[in-house]
Amino acid sequence: LYWTDSGTSRIEVANLDGTHRKVLLWQNLEKPRAIALHPMEGTIYWTDWGNTPRIEYSNMDGSNRRIIADTHLFWPNGLTIDYAGHRMYWVDAKHHVIERADLDGQNRKAVISQGLPHPFAITVFEDSLYWTD
């Protein structure tokens, strides 16, 4: 089980029964929010609301950390992975937008940029996006 903790600025991991809990990432994290895993690729993706908002990824053991997006972001809330399409989608509540990009951050594009007062969470199922507002 992986989770973010904005209060302690950490990403942690543990077995489902709570054993073997460990802090996976803590350096250069300010307010980690959403988290999504890609077990087939062995990667973890997360959003950070800090002074420099960004979307990052690393291997599931915390190694090979990279920034996916760090421009035109303010409140990146929800994040989801489209495994079949090899893309990620996220919502930004301040910019009122749903965006997508390839898993390496390339080909970034706004998907919906109107009529979203405060998008919070997002998920993808087959060819459809679902979000809370």
Image: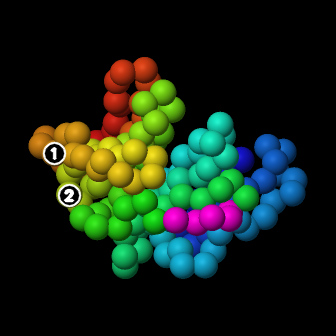
Residue 39 position in % (x across, y down): 66, 40
Q: In this view, does 32 lie above or below 116?
A: below
Q: Indicate whether residue 80 is drawn in magenta.
A: no
Label 2 or label 1, whichever comes before in sequence order: 2
Viewer-nearest residue: 73 or 119: 73
> What is the C-alpha distance between the residues marked 2 and 1?
8 Å
Q: Which mark is residue 95?
A: 2
Q: Position of residue 9 (x, y in %)?
A: 57, 73
Say which residue label 1 marks.
Answer: 113
Residue 65 forms part of the magenta stretch: yes
Local secondary structure at mark 2: loop
At x 24%, y 46%, the residue is 109
Q: Quadrant of residue 127?
A: top left
Looking at the image, residue 38 lies above or below residue 7: above
Relative placement, left or right, of 54 versus 84 is left
| Most distant residue in the left direction | 114
Helix, strand or loop at disc 1? loop
Q: Picture coordinates of residue 94 (x, y %)? A: 23, 60
Residue 124 appearing in the image: yes
Q: Which of 66 and 5 is in front in this view?
A: 66
Q: For the residue carrying disc 1, how many other residues have a C-alpha within 10 Å: few (<14), some (14-19), or many (20+)?
A: few
Quadrant in the rendering for residue 47: bottom left
Residue name at image x 48 percent, y 27 percent: 84
- Are there few (<14), some (14-19), or many (20+) residues within 10 Å of tag 2? some
| Residue located 79% across and 43% down the image | 16
Image quadrant assignment for residue 24: bottom right
The range drawn in magenta is: 62-66
